[in-house]
Amino acid sequence: MAIKSSTFGRVELSGEDAARFVKHINEDKVNPLALAALARGRKISERIKKGEAFKLKRDA
């Protein structure tokens, strides 16, 4: 495995790791929790663009 990074945080995968990453991006199923978080974020983004106020809910 070869991972290279720079001062600015760039990461480069090479060889088998790069191929595995590309396969993961193209073929694996999407995490439903990630989709839910994305939907919540989009709603908040739309409200911000409209200048609306909102309050985040916190789990206890």
Image: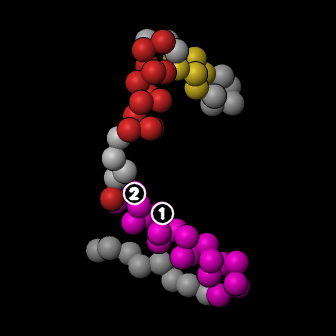
- Residue 60: quadrant of the picture: bottom left
- The stretch drawn in magenta includes residue 38: yes
Foreground of the two, 25 or 46: 25
Q: Which residue position is annotated with label 2? A: 34
Query: How many numbered marks have been drawn onto this rendered protein structure?
Result: 2
Q: Which three-letter amino acid code belongs to the residue tagged 2?
A: Ala
Q: Residue furthest front?
A: 27
| Crowd rating for badge 2 (residues with CA inside 10 Å; few <14, some 14–19, many 20+) | few
The question of residue 58 being in magenta is answered with no
Of residues 43 and 23, the one nearer the viewer is 23
Q: What is the chief secondary structure element of the magenta stretch? A: helix
Mark 1 neighbour density, 10 Å: few (under 14) some (14–19) many (20 or more) = few
Does dot 1 land on a helix, a strand or a loop?
Answer: helix
Drawn side of residue 55 relative to residue 57, left or right: right
- The circle drawn on residue 48 is none
Labelled pair 2, 1 in contact (Cβ < 8 Å): yes
Which of the 4 image quadrants contains residue 23? Answer: top left
Image x and y of residue 57, in percent: 41, 79
In the rendered view of the protein, which quadrant contains the N terminus?
A: top left
**Tag 2's secondary structure?**
helix
Residue 40 locus on image (x, y percent): 47, 71
**Pointer 1 residue:** 38
Q: Where's residue 26, x and y in %?
A: 44, 38
Q: Residue, x 32% and y 73% (percent of image)?
A: 59
Q: Residue at x 34, y 60 (%)?
A: 33
Task: Answer above or below: position of 53 versus 14.
Answer: below
From which residue to which does the magenta span run? Answer: 33-52
